[in-house]
Image (cartoon, rainbow, N blue to C red):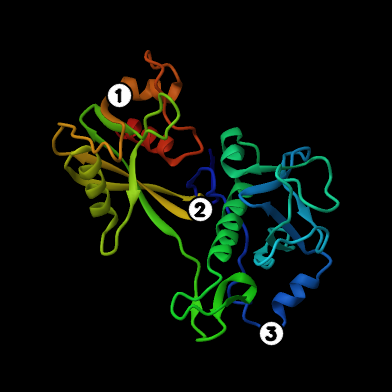
Amino acid sequence: MSTSKFGQKVITFNGGVIDRVAPQRAEPGYIEGLAASDAARTICFANDRALIDVEANPPRAWRTVNGAIERKEPVKRMLLGLEPSGDPLFAQFVEHDEDGRPAGDVPSSVKAIDLRSLASQDLVSVEEFGMLAYARSMLNWHATHQFCAYCGGKTHMVEGGDRRKCEDCGREHFPRTDPVVIIVVYQGDRCLLGRSKNFVEGMYSALAGFMEPGETLEDAARREVLEEAGIHVGKVSYVMSQPWPFVSSLMMGLLGEALDDKIDIDPHELEDARWFSRDEAQSLLDGTHPDGLKAPNPFAIAHHLLLAYLQKT
């Protein structure tokens, strides 16, 4: 994990450095000018897999010149913004085979890799992860919002993909991000962690859930913990956040103080939940737990929330 220019910790998917050029997008001819530039490049996705040049040093998203490979309709090529070099950067879905190999002239060093695998291998830089998370979330939003939620009319990209507009009623639609609270609850020198049946074997993590309308971060976290584990939570403090591009969530990391300790899990939400001592929590992170239990990988915010709990207590 690195540190941003603002002195904040940067974890996977947090390191976006793209200038999204919001003020300029509405200027007549601006998007078209960027698209026609010899410096313009495009990153490509084969569904949920990014095309990565694994032989670059370090590996990075493959950037193709405009029109080099076939775009997959109906999603148009969208403008991400300007790279730190000032060069325009676009993103698009591409036609591909079952293995994710795109149609067109693509170097053999370019592989289609899903973002979760990239993250687990820590394969690209912090800045590339931030850009890829942004691109994947936006492309998926465009793919799933082809029609107006108000009248059912066809929608199209405007301002390079910054939003969509209905061709019938004229309403504008903006990209959505789904807020998720994720919390490590503690009481004295122990913390509460749980596991879903979908987790890899032996992994325990922070409790998490989507926020509901009308909730604060604190209230959403208290509700989730009570619903999933039967524990009442008092004081809640914010730690950090993480964009989570599966498909487009914002994980908001918290620590919370438990008011009681009797666990009553909801079997529809959790397979198990239990209290871990500080030493056990450290062993989860170190991979030395005597029962072979483990914490989430370092690319996940839950890993860093567990670290924050250990530092706090």
Q: Amino acid at mark 2?
A: Val
Q: Secondary structure at mark 3?
A: loop
| Closer to us: 65 or 69 | 69
Q: Amino acid at mark 1?
A: Arg
Q: Earlier in the sequence, mark 2 or mark 1?
A: 2
**Residues at circles 3 and 1 in contact by the CB criterion of under 8 Å:** no
Quarter containing the C terminus = top left
Q: Position of residue 25 (x, y in %)?
A: 63, 76
10 Å crowding of disc 2: few (<14), some (14-19), many (20+): some
Q: Earlier in the sequence, mark 3 or mark 1?
A: 3
Q: Secondary structure at mark 1?
A: helix
Name the image quarter holding residue 194.
top left
Q: Earlier in the sequence, mark 2 or mark 3?
A: 3
Q: Secondary structure at mark 2?
A: loop
Q: Position of residue 34 (x, y in %)?
A: 75, 71
Per the model, the C-alpha gap separating discs 2 and 3 is 32 Å
In the depicted structure, whether residue 63 falls above or below residue 163: above
| Closer to us: 126 or 146 | 146
10 Å crowding of disc 3: few (<14), some (14-19), many (20+): few
Drawn side of residue 195 relative to residue 79, left or right: left
Per the model, the C-alpha gap separating discs 3 and 1 is 59 Å
How many badges with numbers are in the image? 3
Q: Which residue is mark 1?
A: 278
Tell me which residue sits at (75%, 46%) in the image: 101
Per the model, the C-alpha gap separating discs 2 and 1 is 33 Å
Q: Position of residue 288 (x, y in %)?
A: 43, 16
Q: Amino acid at mark 3?
A: Pro
Q: Which residue is mark 3?
A: 28
**Residues at circles 2 and 1 in contact by the CB criterion of under 8 Å:** no
Q: Position of residue 300 (x, y in %)?
A: 47, 39
Say which mark, if any, is on residue 247.
Answer: 2
- Point out the frontmost of discs 2 and 1: 2
